[in-house]
Image (spheres, rainbow, N blue to C red):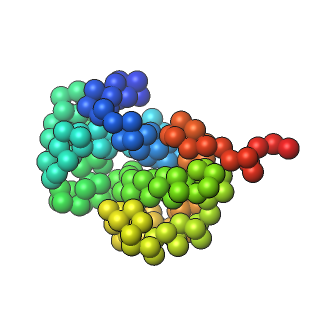
């Protein structure tokens, strides 16, 4: 299994945009946090999260992640990592079976949606983002319109969680790295 540093280098070689790198980092952290919760391999789950879209800039169509999976195989990534990455895109036909696969699907779209929700807040922070605010944004079809709302709820279901539980868990995870992914610590969260 290649190291996290090797995975990051591969991501940076294939992904030039800062926003997609930040998304990769967000999903990596959410996956690591879920791995810890479930007693799974944090490094492996983190690499899956980091690399799930590494080929998207080159193949922003249905060749992603299939062509990327060939690159991963050439670079020595294990088949369960490759399979998880393939399974996050329904059109690949790879049915999600493992907990790692379900977690990737559940965190991918939600991380992007939560980041969008935080960015439109006055403090641009996860610190004051509540599940109720996220649910209001979900109802607004014009907000982050490319996000499939069914994937947001379906991901939680695949993990056997309510949407509220899943959403609160991922918000808490992303608070830990929010400055790294372009958000701010709110003044409300600063120690008195």
Q: Which residue lies at the image location 29% right of the left edge and 59% below the top edge?
A: 96
136 vs 171, nearest the viewer? 136
Horizontal arrangement in the rendering, residue 2 relative to residue 30 (left or right): left
Is 161 left, or right, of 73 in this rendering?
right
Q: Position of residue 165 (x, y in %)?
A: 57, 65
State the image coordinates of residue 40 (x, y, percent, origin top left). 48, 45
Quarter of the figure with the C terminus: top right
User: Which residue is at the far right?
Assistant: 192
Q: Quadrant of residue 69?
A: top left
Q: Quick one: 129 or 66, which is closer to the camera?
A: 129
Q: From the viewer's perspective, tell me whether residue 70 is left or right of residue 118.
A: left
Q: Identify the residue shown where x is 31% and y is 58%.
A: 97
Residue 95 can be seen in this image: yes
The one nearer the camera, 137 or 45, is 137
On screen, residue 63 versus residue 7, left or right, reads: left
Query: Which residue corresponds to the image point at 52% horizontal and 73% vertical from the top-left?
Result: 136
């Amino acid at each position: 299994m290649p190291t996290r540093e090797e995975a990051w280098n591969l991501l940076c070689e294939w992904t030039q945009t800062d926003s997609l790198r930040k998304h990769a980092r967000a999903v990596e952290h959410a996956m690591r946090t879920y791995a810890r919760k479930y007693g799974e391999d944090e490094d492996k789950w983190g690499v899956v999260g980091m690399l799930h879209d590494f080929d998207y800039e080159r193949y922003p169509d249905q060749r992603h992640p299939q062509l990327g999976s060939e690159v991963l195989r050439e670079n020595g990534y294990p088949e369960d990592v490759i399979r998880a990455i393939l399974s996050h895109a329904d059109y690949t036909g790879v049915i999600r079976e493992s907990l790692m696969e379900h977690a990737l699907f559940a965190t991918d779209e939600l991380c992007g949606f939560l980041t969008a929700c935080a960015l439109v807040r006055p403090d641009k922070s996860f610190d004051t983002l509540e599940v109720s605010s996220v649910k209001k944004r979900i109802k607004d079809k014009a907000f982050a319109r490319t996000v499939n709302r069914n994937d947001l709820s379906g991901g939680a279901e695949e993990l056997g969680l309510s949407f509220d539980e899943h959403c609160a868990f991922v918000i808490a995870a992303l608070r830990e790295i929010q400055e790294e992914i372009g958000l701010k610590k709110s003044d409300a969260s600063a120690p008195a």
